């Protein structure tokens, strides 16, 4: 039986694209770079931004760090608008919470930004732990971020915990930490990607997540 559910944020709870694109435009313009197409940007949602800057734009480590600094600078200036909650997500969170299930967050977004997004959508109070990336680079990758969340949930058994996310990074991070996974298809990854990396369950809607989690045989 599942007692704890840890969610990814971008592509799982919220669609960050409008916010992400405007901050990336600001960041890359400072370096004289162009923003990739909307289709290309879909690949960027999920991995740490610094890694995407290096992998998809071939920026050097120094250029990527500078672009990341500009991105966060603009994020703080413009705020959280454009990070839209998916339909059915709040109902999913409330439904799990009301069933006595502990809820956590593990996201590659900076922790301070993640908390702000949860508060903006009035769901922060349902979360027992929020674990995000740190500005100093101590926590960047999903495995590290998830491990930090699990450490904060010291009374929970890994066998009773599941990670919910939309990209392969979520699945790999969960496997690295020895917990089950639910891949969701309403975000930026598809069923083929999620299954190929080992997602045990697939949810096509937020209500599917509730059904899977509350299955006593899980």
Image (cartoon, rainbow, N blue to C red):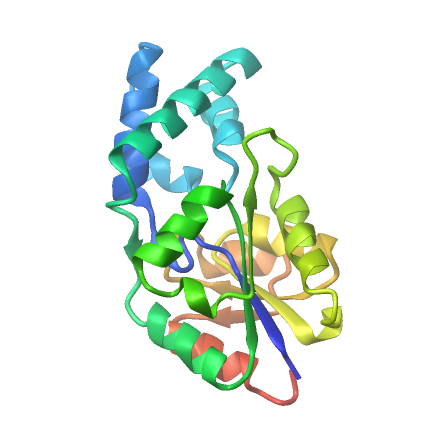
- Tell me: residue 68, above or below residue 60: below
Q: In the image shown, does 181 or 134 lie closer to the viewer?
A: 134
User: Which quarter shows the N terminus?
Assistant: bottom right
Q: How many marks?
A: 0
Residue farthest along the front direction in this orientation: 125
Instruction: Residue at 24% x, 45% y: name it.
Output: 81
| Up-down relation of residue 131 to residue 52 (above or below) | below
Along the line of sight, which residue is nearer the eye, 107 or 179?
A: 107
Q: Residue at x 31, y 62 (%)?
A: 86
Residue 27 location, quadrant: top left
Residue 34 versus residue 170 in the image, above or below = above
Report whether 73 appears left or right of 37: right
Q: Vertical placement of 157 versus 73: above or below?
A: below
Q: Residue furthest top?
A: 32
Quarter residue 24 falls in: top left
- Asked whether residue 145 is in view, the answer is yes
The residue at 63%/78% (across/down) is: 3
Q: Position of residue 69 (x, y in %)?
A: 44, 22
**Rendering coords of residue 185 (x, y %):** 42, 62
Q: Is residue 37 visible?
A: no
- Choose between 163 and 81: the one closer to the eye: 81
In the visual, does 104 lie left or right of 86? right
Q: Residue at x 35, y 70 (%)?
A: 90
Position of residue 140 in the picture relative to residue 190 (left or right): right
Q: Position of residue 52 (x, y in %)?
A: 48, 30
**In which quadrant will I find the C terminus?**
bottom right
Which residue sits furthest bottom? 216
The x and y percentages for residue 74 are: 31, 27
Identify the image quadrant of residue 133.
top right
């Amino acid at each position: 039986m599942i007692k704890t559910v840890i969610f990814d944020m971008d592509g799982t709870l919220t669609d960050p694209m409008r916010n992400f694109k405007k901050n990336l435009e600001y960041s890359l313009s400072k370096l004289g770079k162009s923003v990739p197409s909307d289709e290309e940007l879909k690949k960027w949602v999920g991995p740490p931004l610094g890694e995407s800057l290096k992998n998809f734009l071939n920026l050097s480590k120094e250029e990527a760090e500078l672009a990341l600094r500009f991105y966060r600078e603009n994020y703080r200036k413009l705020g959280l608008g454009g990070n839209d909650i998916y339909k059915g997500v709040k109902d999913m969170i409330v439904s799990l919470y009301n069933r006595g299930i502990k809820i956590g967050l593990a996201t590659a977004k900076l922790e301070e930004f993640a908390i702000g997004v949860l508060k903006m959508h009035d769901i922060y109070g349902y979360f027992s732990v929020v674990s995000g990336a740190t500005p100093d680079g101590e926590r960047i990758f999903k495995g590290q971020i998830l491990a930090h969340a699990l450490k904060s949930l010291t009374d929970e058994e890994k066998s009773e915990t599941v990670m919910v996310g939309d990209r392969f990074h979520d699945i790999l991070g969960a496997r690295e930490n020895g917990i089950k996974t639910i891949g969701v298809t309403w975000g930026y990854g598809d069923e083929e990607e999620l299954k190929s990396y080992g997602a045990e369950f697939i949810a096509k809607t937020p209500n599917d997540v509730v059904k899977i989690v509350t299955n006593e045989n899980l």
